[in-house]
Structure formats: structure tokens, C-alpha cells
Image: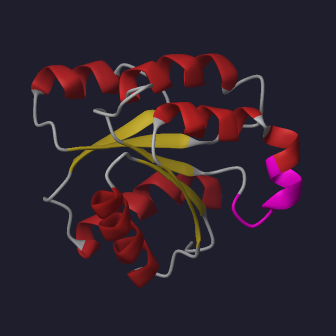
Amino acid sequence: MKNINVLIVDDSELDRYILRRQLTALGVKNIEEKDDGSSALAYLKDYDRNYLLFPDKFPPIIIFLDINMPKVNGFDFLEEFAKIRKQFDFRSCVVAMYSSSERSEDKERALKYEFVSRYLVKGEMTESFLNETIQALVKPRSN
């Protein structure tokens, strides 16, 4: 279960650090980080190269995605990801929104995408809750 590929997309270095530490404490080793939506999309679109260079981290199974980022925000990322997920091998990839926004409009908007499985509020995530979330997200893949 812990041998999953995770991509963290967040412009906050501190938030990426905290999430990485929590994931690492749970035994997750295959973690890639991007500091904005545009670099994450470029990373995902360069499928062939990244699959060869980072076979232990690519493609991601779970993407933890922030909403409020410069350049390409989380919702812009979701729009583009919806287009490319079938072109590349991302159909089994799920997105967990990882945001400081507690606004119900943001949660509803994010969860309209079939591949967005969770909406997590930063600062409310304990390691136990994160572990339960990861287990729920990867459970269908263990069959």
C-alpha cells in the first residue's frame, strides 16, 4: 500500500514540507513535488521522458493539489488535467484537493470532476486521517 506514487502540487514550500513529512512518516517513499500548476502539467505531459527517468515516482497515483497558486491555480490545473488524463496513462490517478479554503463553493467545484476523490483542508490533517485517506484512495487498485 505504501509503495504508491504521489505528486504534491502546492506553491507553499512549508505546506509541501509538512505534507511530505506526514506521507514519509506513513511509509510513502515515492513523492514528487511541484510548486505550481504549470510545472505540474508540464511534468505530467512529458510522460515518456518522466516514465523513463523516474520509474519509481511516475506516473502518480495520487495528486495532492492546492487551489490558490500563481500562474496556473488548482482549478485551471483540473481543467487541463481533464483533457490530458485520457491521452496519457492517468485514468487511474486520483486528485485530492489540499487547500486552506474551507469554502463550500470551492469544495463543490472541485468534486464535480470525476477524478477528484477528496477535499482536504490544510491544518486539519492528522497523520491518522491522511493514512485513512490514502487507504481509501488506493483501495480500488489493490484488487
- For the point 38% across and 29% down, the residue is 74
Q: Is residue 40 left or right of residue 131?
A: right
Camera-side residue of 141 and 129: 129
In this view, 53 is above or below 29:
above
Camera-side residue of 14 and 21: 14
The question of residue 27 being in magenta is answered with no
Camera-side residue of 5 and 143: 5
- For the point 14% across and 59% down, the residue is 123
Range drawn in magenta:
50-57
Camera-side residue of 26 and 54: 54
Q: Is residue 143 left or right of residue 114?
A: right
Residue 72, image x, y percentages: 44, 25
Residue 51, image x, y percentages: 83, 51
In this view, 41 is above or below 108:
below
Residue 61, image x, y percentages: 60, 51
- In which image quadrant can residue 109 be found? top left
In this view, 97 is above or below 88:
below
- For the point 32% across and 25% down, the residue is 110
In this view, 75 is above or below 17:
above
- In which image quadrant can residue 14 be found? bottom left
Q: In this view of the protein, can residue 111 be seen by the observer?
A: yes
Residue 27, image x, y percentages: 49, 82
Q: Is residue 45 left or right of residue 82?
A: right
